[in-house]
Image (cartoon, coloured by chain):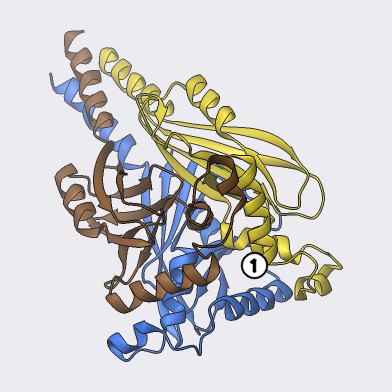
Chain colours: A blue, B brown, C yellow
Amino acid sequence: MPKCVLAVIRARTILSSMIKTTEYIVQTQGHCDIHDLTPALRHTLTAVGLKEGHALVFVAGSTAGVTSVEFEPGLVRDIHEFFERLIPEQRDYFHHATWGDDNGSSHLRAALLKPSLTIPFRDGQFMTGTWQQIVLIDFDTRPRQRSIIFQFIGE
Amino acid sequence: MPKCVLAVIRARTILSSMIKTTEYIVQTQGHCDIHDLTPALRHTLTAVGLKEGHALVFVAGSTAGVTSVEFEPGLVRDIHEFFERLIPEQRDYFHHATWGDDNGSSHLRAALLKPSLTIPFRDGQFMTGTWQQIVLIDFDTRPRQRSIIFQFIGE
Amino acid sequence: MPKCVLAVIRARTILSSMIKTTEYIVQTQGHCDIHDLTPALRHTLTAVGLKEGHALVFVAGSTAGVTSVEFEPGLVRDIHEFFERLIPEQRDYFHHATWGDDNGSSHLRAALLKPSLTIPFRDGQFMTGTWQQIVLIDFDTRPRQRSIIFQFIGE
């Protein structure tokens, strides 16, 4: 009987290694500030040691979002301009009346872009395109310290 | 030998408890009706008993979406106004000619917002911000009974 | 002792079968070309043999996106028109100055729609609505051969 208890304990150990949750802190400037999370994400995947599965990237808070983009200065300006055209910062929003806030645009942009992205990996490598980076976009109207969750599930 | 068979059975049991799929029914009014799913989602996570992993929230159907937002009345009005400005309900859409439907705007809005959101949890708690709720937005042009899938994966 | 080692090996085997990563190649025409991935995705789920879990659909590259939609010709035209109205192809984007490219609109549209979608399944069937298909939208300005990742996690 003790031998079989050992077997069960080993099975639990294998299972426990399937999910790894880490936190990554980013200091942002707001106003559609775009941060490349790819180097930190790759580094964490290597440290975690999983080979096949997916990574969930999630930003806590309702005024920022996560997506993928070719991270280059021209496109960064295009993204700024696009969100300013679609949901201008200076417009008067109903949200401002609720708390006396000025970040209604931040909330709308974040609700549209959404706070999570899931990326597959195999052989310990993300299966992204060569020019495809994972980015945080902070839409708030002031600098923020952001907590980004990297959660890896796999084997 | 019987002892080891027992060990395998236990390992299977642990594995089976890693994925839990539940269905949550919401009665909506359509026309950008926004429902806070957070209390039901938290309650289900507690009932399921998983401690670390992620929850997939998915709405079946192509005229509704799921996102996160600070759920307060001002922002709810801002979201209504934003979607009405971006994709107006009363415009004539090609989709209307196909089935004689009037909900082309609902389909476009839902395709843009998408039907799923994934949220990490640890220590049995969602790793969301304090003012970040998980919401269903029903874009259809009539009341609907919506089936929302909550799927938990973890340990 | 050898009997218990056998038990551990069996547990590993069960675990290994929980994640399956496959690649699906699609030839696209760009310019908001919409492809229904649902038949291939269903076929792959059946082949993989998992019963409960979720499928991650991910497109490698930063000029395409994945969403769900009722896949019918009228709505396909509506989606074309919507993206052309929101982010026109012929506008001059800052991205064009960086590489001499002409696909700034493709990058913006893809960053907005995002490259992944997660869909739950149970009893070996996707829990989608009857008229809800999973689609790739290729926003690039030229034909592309696209690598779509289908990753299944479950049991």
Position of C63 compared to A36: left or right? Answer: right
Looking at the image, the residue that sits furthest to the right is C100
> Mark 1 is on which residue type?
Leu
- Residue depicted at x 25% and y 49%: B26
Front-most of C128 and C144?
Answer: C128
- Residue depicted at x 68% and y 75%: A78
Secondary structure of the residue carrying tag 1 is helix
Total labels: the figure holds 1
Which of the 4 quarters of the picture holds residue B98?
top right
Q: Is residue A49 above or below residue C47?
A: below
Residue that numbered label 1 is attached to: C86
Q: Where residue B4 sits: x, y (%)? A: 22, 14
Looking at the image, the residue that sits furthest to the top is B1
Which of the 4 quarters of the picture holds residue B78?
bottom left
Q: Where residue C145 sits: x, y (%)? A: 76, 41
Position of C18 compared to B47: left or right? Answer: right
Position of C35 compared to B150: left or right? Answer: right
Q: Is residue A102 above or below residue B124?
A: below
Q: Where residue B62 sits: x, y (%)? A: 46, 46
- Whether residue C60 is visible here, answered yes or no, is no
- Residue depicted at x 59% and y 45%: B97
Position of A74 compared to A126: left or right? Answer: right
Q: Residues within 10 Å of mark 1 (few under 14, many from 20)?
A: some
* Quadrant of image for the C terminus of chain A: top left
- Residue depicted at x 83% and y 74%: C97
Q: Is residue B10 above or below residue C92?
A: above
Which of the 4 quarters of the picture holds residue B35?
bottom left
- Whether residue A130 is visible here, answered yes or no, is yes
Q: Where residue A3 sits: x, y (%)? A: 19, 21
* Quadrant of image for the N terminus of chain A: top left
